[in-house]
Image: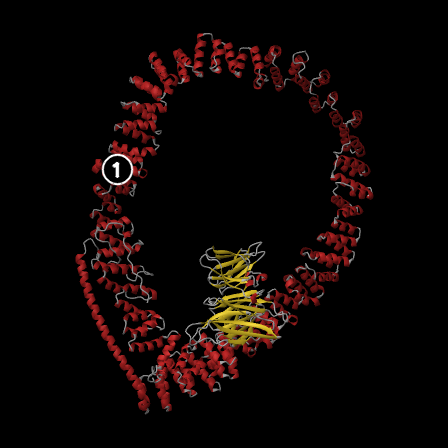
Amino acid sequence: MAAASAPITMKEALTLTSLGINQQFITFTHVTMESDKYICVRETSPQNSVVIIDTSMPLQPLRRPITADSALMNPTSRILALKAQIPGTTQDHLQIFNIELKTKIKSHQMPEQVVFWKWITPKMLGLVTQAVVYHWSLEGDSEPVRVFDRAANLSGNQIINYRCDPTEKWLVLIGIAPGAPERPQLVKGSMQLFSVDQQRSQALEAHAACFTSFKVPGNDASSILISFATKTISGGQLTSKLHVIELGAQPGKAGFTKKQADLFFPPDFADDFPVAMQVSQKYSLIYVITKLGLLFVYDLDTATAVYRNRISPDPIFLTTDCPSLGGFYAVNRRGQVLLATVNEATIVPFVSGQLNNLELAINLAKRGNLPGAENLVVQRFHELFSQMKYKEAAELAAESPQAILRTPDTVAKFQSVPVQAGQTPPLLQYFGTLLTKGKLNAFESLELSRLVVNQNKKNLLENWLAEDKLECSEELGDLVKTVDNDLALKIYIKARATPKVVAAFAERREFDKILIYSKQVGYTPDYLFLLQTILRSDPQGAVNFALMLSQMEGGCPVDYNTITDLFLQRNLIREATSFLLDVLKPNLAEHAMLQTKVLEINLVTFPNVADAILANGMFSHYDRPRVAQLCEKAGLYMRALQHYTELPDIKRVIINTHAIEPQALVEFFGTLSRDWALECMKELLLVNMRGNLQIIVQVAKEYSEQLGVDSCVKLFEQFKSYEGLYFFLGSYLSSSEDPDIHFKYIEAAAKTGQLKEVERVTRESNFYDPEKTKNFLMEAKLPDARPLINVCDRFGFVPDLTHYLYSNNMLRYIEGYVQKVNPSNAPLVVGQLLDDDCPDDFIKGLILSVRSLLPVEPLVAECEQRNRLRLLTQFLEHLVSEGSQDVHVHNALGKIIIDTNNNPEHFLTTNPYYDSRVVGKYCEKRDPTLAVVAYRRGQCDEELVNVTNKNSLFKLQARYVVERMEPDLWAKVLDPENPFRRQLIDQVVSTALPESKNPEQVSATVKAFMTADLPHELIELLEKIVLQNSAFSGNPNLQNLLILTAIKADKSRVMDYINRLDNFDGPAVGEIAVGSELYEEAFAIFKKFNLNVQAVNVLLDNIRSIERAVEFASRVEEDEVWSQVAKAQLKEGLVSDAIDSFICANDATEFLDVIRAAEQARVYEDLVKYLLMVRKKIKEPKVDSELIYAYAKIDRLGEIEEFIVQPNVANLQSAGDRLFDEALYEAAKIIFTHISNWARLASTLVKLHQFQGAVDAARKANSSKTWKEVCFACVDAEEFRLAQICGLNIIVQVDDLEEVSDYYQNRGRFDELITLMESGLGLERAHMGIFTELGTLYARYRPEKLMEHLKLFSTRINIPKLIRVCDEQQHWKELTYLYIQYDEYDNAATTIMNHSPEAWDHMQFKDVSVKVANVELYYKAVHFYLDEHPDLINDLLNVLAARVDHTRVVDILRKAGHLPLVKPYMVAVQSSNNASVNEALNELYIEEEDYDRLRESIDMHDNFDQISMAQRVEKHELLEFRRIAAYIYKKAGRWRQSVALSKKDNLYKDAMETCSQSGDRELAEELLTFFVDQGKKECFASCLFTCYDLIRADVALELAWMNNMVDFVFPYLLQFLREYTGKVDELIKDKLDKLHEVKSKEFEEKELVTQQNMYAQLLPLALPAPPMPGMGGGFEAGYVGNPTGMPVYGMPPMPPY
């Protein structure tokens, strides 16, 4: 059956694999689809994610990283349910998330494992465990509720579905289990039906089930039905049934009769079984879907089979209902999501034609409103009507598909039936049936309402309208308006009769609803007229209405100015203002005139309102000069200032300070320019300086930065206003650093008598000019000297201050300053007083009054500078007596004692407080010895050295230096640049050092000589100390120093000192002698102190005499000495001698160097002796390992075997590796065998060509590398049996497979390699690589086995790799198979067509062609089939019908000349109304002379060149074809040609109908004349009525009268007269209505003129003329405030109708 004519349409909605979902995740446990909205795929390891696919936008899947055992999307909303098993338990954790809000809704931990779950409703989850079924509500915090226990028949079953009915009163649980023993491949299905009300279960056998609701005739309530499918085996006989049963039948009401039907499975599907069932509520059809892809369609009402077909070649495991389309979705294992829907155009014809079931066809058409049964329904209607079965006929008409019987003809037919007495009229029966079935159409509603209105039963109309049973129309509203205006308005609104609705609202004075309604329906009424009407009775309502107009989308339909004028004409100032304030809020430039207007109106009438508007600042585009003048007149001076832009105007207004708020005036100055502001300030000072000074000062303070401080100061100075200057600068002073500002402030404060402020500023300010301020204060001679004292004290003018105060006899201020202000400056005061010849008594008294607060040092300096130091004697003695320890006090007192020579040495040695440097300096010129005493006491090194050098006091200097023991001092005096160094050294050697008994002094002196690099002088000094029996002769340090100095300065004396001295540090001195290359002296020192190791090292390292070293070692016989000798021998390459020395030394420490040297010298015999000695000393792996190696090198394998079995610490692995690397394989074999290193043993045995042993070792090693090594060696040795054993252990590793294959192939061992791979197929660890590699080998070397291999293992091979190999080897059939398996259908189709002799198979090519992505391949396939398989081209095209461009296909066939070949295809696709298809088919119908099909084609498919077709058939020899030509001309609008053809063939009825439809009067009258000429009177009369609207009455009457046909024209004339009489009556009525309207309009215009004149008389003079565009609102009289606080006017919403 062609797909286009099938009753069920299948299409691929999407493919899961194309969305990136792996094939392995497309299973029942991973994919869920709870509704037609979402598909949920759970991806496990390694992704661990959940993919949510919205079927409305499948190309945008939502992937979230979630790990779960199951995931379900809610059927209607974006809510995800997740289930995961708690690790280590059998419990499940359930969670529900809102994906959009990213929040968790609920979670619960189940005490038992959930084996199946499903959304049974959008708000309820069904949970099935091993024993119990729970329900878990999405709402609230409730936990899962136990509903019922699982029945016994479901024990051990896999649960595949769980459902509930629409009322949630019935539940069904379905499971499957393995089949009976006699037929285990047939799966057994079990079902448990549970009643919630009865709390009872029933166990049944079923594989699939579904609930639905169904309306049984005679029962108003819906019945709940369950349909279920079974497939059982009994006695070897298969039984497949579909059952439909009603649940919970309602007593006393019509019920559903139980139905059942057989399910017919084809022989190939004997073991197939139903897996899902869906019921289409839209069409009342049952869909039964089987696992292998069969679809059974049954009628729900009768359980009649409708259709069966296979819809998927792959197993189907999941389905879901698609209620919007009346079909279902199905998911198969390939990942296809298939959508099955009813083909509405073909199902009814299919049932009526193919199934020959007319009753079912009619029922389907009625239930689903489907086409295809029109003739059957009409025929049935007439039969019932003729049988007087009016009720049945009414029901048939009410349920007729596509309402084909619900026409005026049907109503007329019921009206024509005579009413029998005592019976309900058939017409009312008809309407009653329609009302029970649904809604009436417009004509039916009008006719029924007319009956009801005539019977005055308005309440029925109201009920029907409330129940939406009537279709509203304007005519129905007109009818109802005669009895009820409100009801009529509702009808008008529903019928969208906009003019009538507006008129009705206007009559009810509900103008606000007019606006809302007009906006809703897009109607534009006369708003100006409405506004005028409202204004007459409700001004405030008019404001609200005007505001609503202003807020309409697209702008106000009435000009704002016009609206404003309407308010002003009635002197509604407040309303106009309110309106304008509201509409002018956007503050647009185009509203400048309206802004000016609203301000003018209120400035004249309500100034306070205008002031509030201006204060709000909502306008910025009005006429500012005009508003400024009005503000000035209204006394709003501040507003006037804000609006004036000329300086004279501002100066004129600003002087009215008595009427302006000071703060506002100050803020106004901030808006002026600098020059204008200064001018205004001058104006205010000129007018009233005293009254306006405060404002001016405030302005100057506020805007000092803008105006400039200097300008403000000059302004005040210009008017000599020191008070203003004082107040202004006082505010600015704290932020200014300008010296002039600070000085001017001090000056202004002084001149205004603000002495406290002067004192404060001089004390606190840091910015005034001190010199200038000091001079000003001295000149001002203020009575209070504190400001001057502040300035002079802070800025160092104390002498000037003292002189000023002393000169002006202000001695008390001098005392106060010294005692209280700053005693530290008393020395300066005393100095100035001494310069001013002040009496000593006053000065002494001043000094004594300060006492300890007085700084002594500057006071002494001042007095000493003036040689009046003795003046301080009393003061200083007083301080000392008080216990003062001040250094300056004692310095001054010391100077006085020195000058008076009052026992100065006693003072200098006993006084601890004076400064030695100061006093010593004071004594240098008076007595140098006193200076030395002072310097010595204070350790003033530099000063003492200078004074002793200057006065040649070297003995004192030498004694001081020795006693000081200061390295820096010694460095200074022993400096070569010191000209007095020699004199000092002589005094040190001769006097100072011999006098000293302190060892530290001696040591410091010696170190100083050493530091100064005076070796000869040092030797001289030391010989005198050490060799001449002094107290320090036995001092070890001095002996060491003497020898070391001799080593450095005089090496010839060293050996003598070594022999003479015994108390020096031998080891240290010996090392120094070695460093100084005195090797013999060093050897003598080490030998003298028995340091034999150091001595032998000198012989070996420095003297380099191994012979003397061996001799010395033999004499002393010390191991350490022998060890040193051995190392030296080893270093010189004397390996054997070194080994002997090491043995003598019993030294094993250098075994690494000995081993290395012995191996280089290849003296393994000696090495063995040495290593045996070493093993006794230490346990070192290196030693044992080297011993093994040495044994191997001298071929002592027996010793190796003995050694390794004994305790040892050898690294046998490393030793074995070393032996192997150096080809000592036998020894290596012993080692590897002992340590069980099978991998290395295998390698060793391979080197020894012991292959069987190598294989055994490799088996024990079980290492891929070892297996490969042994395998490759066996291949090279042609030991293929052993190589295969190895290879089987290698190829199970994916990474090593290719290496093995390449090794075999490179050596040409193809058969052995194929045998190896074939053997590997049966391995437990066989992987994809083995199957792929074997396929590659077959393709290259055994092509006859390739296809069988691919079919057997298609799921286990790497298809892309084999595709490349097959392409290279040109195995086209196999290549095609691989492309299909890999879903590369484009390449598969191309390969089939390019290599058809080998690759083509028709069924296979059809399956491939529908899946290709490149559309060009469709047309290439058409060419291919035309060339090679033309007999099958229709079959191919039917498959491709939904995918190809039909125009292109027809062009291909037309060019090839084979259009008749594809006629079945073109018939099947003609429903798409393609021009090329239509023209091609029409041509074939003409050639076949099939006029019926041609006429049907033209009627149903009009997309073709109609004129060309008409011209082609108008001369056809058959009448029907010429009639078709006329018909085509008529459809194309070529009326005259159509009529001509009809007249030519005597088809007068066609000619008359053509004229009537043309609307051409001339053509109609020509046809009428033709009938007269031909004498066809009946045709003449018929033409008059057919063309009634076109034929003029005078022409018809003239022709009839002249040709004796008056009787035939008379019926036409009667109808014409009746029509025109009615038209004249209508015209007269319209004329009277227009006259009445004109009079009403004239009256309104006169009234409007009268109101305008009244407005002009009352309007204030300041207002402009009324006709200005604008809008308005209003304030209450006297209102002052923010206009934005006004109430917002609005209109309540229109109530629903």
Tell me the crowding category of disc 1: few under 14, some 14 to 19, or many 20 or more residues within 10 angstroms, Cα based: many
* Residue 1564: percent from left, percent from top: 36, 84
Count of picture labels: 1
* Residue 1051: percent from left, percent from top: 71, 19
Residue 269 visible here: yes
Image color mode: secondary structure
Q: Which residue is mark 1?
A: 696
Label 1, secondary structure: give it.
helix
Q: Quadrant of residue 1078?
A: top right
Q: Quadrant of residue 1363?
A: bottom right
Residue 183 relative to residue 174: left or right: right
Looking at the image, is 328 positioned above or below residue 1137? below
Residue 346 visible here: no
Residue 1284 relative to residue 1356: left or right: right
User: Which residue occupies 24% across, 57% down?
Assistant: 576
Looking at the image, is 1480 positioned above or below residue 329? below
Q: Nearer the viewer, residue 1353 or 254?
A: 254
Residue 610 relative to residue 156: left or right: left
* Residue 508: percent from left, percent from top: 26, 67
Looking at the image, is 580 positioned above or below residue 1149? below
Looking at the image, is 1615 positioned above or below residue 686? below
Q: Nearer the viewer, residue 872 or 444?
A: 444
Instruction: Give the amino acid at mark 1.
Output: Ile
User: Which residue occupies 28% across, 37% down?
Assistant: 700
* Residue 895: percent from left, percent from top: 44, 12
Where, quadrant-wise, is the C terminus in this rendering?
bottom left
Q: Quadrant of residue 1126?
A: top right
Where, quadrant-wise, is the N terminus in this rendering?
bottom right
